Image (cartoon, rainbow, N blue to C red):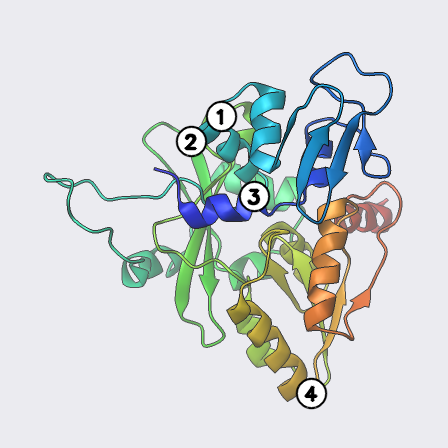
Amino acid sequence: MLDKFAILKLRQLPIEAVAQRLGISVVRHKSLCPFHDDHHASLTFNTRSNTYRCFACGAHGGTIDLVMNRLHRDFPDACRWLADDTCIIVDEYKPQTHSGCMPPKPFDALRYARHFEHPWLSDEAKRFLFVERRLSPVVVRWCRLTSWTDRHGIHWLEMPYFDTEGRLIGVQNRNLDHSKGSAAPRFRFPYGARCSIYNLPVAAMLRQGERLYITEGASDCWAMLSAGHKAIAIPSATLLSPTDKALLKRLAEEHGTSFHMYPDRDTPGERLFMQLKEVLPTLEHHQLPPGCKDYSEYYLVKRNDTTS
């Protein structure tokens, strides 16, 4: 069963960014239509309604429709494809019961908290964190990252989400075998997990007026922390919840926090920056250098420069 709220968030993903991810080149809100032999850029994108329409062949719809038609997938598969790189939970988890009538259980923080009391990193996790990402071991320990292997032999990195008081509110599992062609989704979340802003405990360490970086996704946050900066992360370039916005405003008002951001070099990244700018008018934009699509890549470039 697909989660209805997650489907709504998928429909709100920027339509032009989805098109570009599908290999459709968008210039000034237009592109060649992939659904017929087009030579005059008949496909147009309406960023206000977040839809597309071809005035030649009549193809039209929203983000999910675009994926369904372009990749020839049914609705559930199109939703999972869209969610794969955005950390959006589409498959609602329901515990197995004999009657099938039991209501789903809320997130069991006490159960999952035990996973992070003595974090353990598999060889696959160590390779991902320390060889591929070249992260600081201090940061990995601070973030309480741990790992596990499921019964199908798939290796997962388990990431806890804490609130500002250090209480566990959510867990995100990252498939470490995804790049090897694993059929399992790239991300998995326990039912009821609230994964909003990542690394919130850092708020308790902020001094008055101190700089805080906002990154897009946990990976960029780890890189920023490893570079010696205090940072939090927005899990994906989707709409922020009112609770998230209120928290960011409170940090700015109570602590005088100076917010900074290196947006990803794509449409969703810049759109996320503009969305945050509405909440944090003093948010400062930093430009990534050419060739770096996100801060994680920039961090690796800087690491290579210092060690070469």
Report the amino acid beneath label 1: Ser
Q: Nearer the viewer, residue 189 or 139?
A: 189
Camera-nearest label, 4 or 2: 4
* Residue occupying the point 63% across, 22% down: 70
Q: Do tag 1 and tag 4 residues touch (Cβ < 8 Å)? A: no
Looking at the picture, does residue 229 appear above or below residue 91?
below
Can you tell which mark lies on residue 182? Answer: 1
In three-dimensional space, the C-alpha distance between marks 4 and 3, rounded to whole angstroms, equals: 39 Å
Q: Tell me if mark 4 has few (under 14), some (14-19) or many (20+) residues whose alpha carbon lies within 10 angstroms of its own.
A: few
**Measured from the top left, where is residue 203 in percent x and y?**
58, 76
**Measured from the top left, where is residue 72 in percent x and y?**
56, 18
Image position of 187 (left or right of 268): left
Q: Which residue is mark 2?
A: 154
Q: Tell me if mark 3 has few (under 14), some (14-19) or many (20+) residues whose alpha carbon lies within 10 angstroms of its own.
A: some
Find numbered disc 2 in the image and state the secondary structure of the residue it sits on. loop
- Quadrant of residue 194 within the rendered picture: bottom left
Find numbered disc 4 in the image and state the secondary structure of the residue it sits on. loop
In three-dimensional space, the C-alpha distance between marks 1 and 3, rounded to whole angstroms, equals: 26 Å
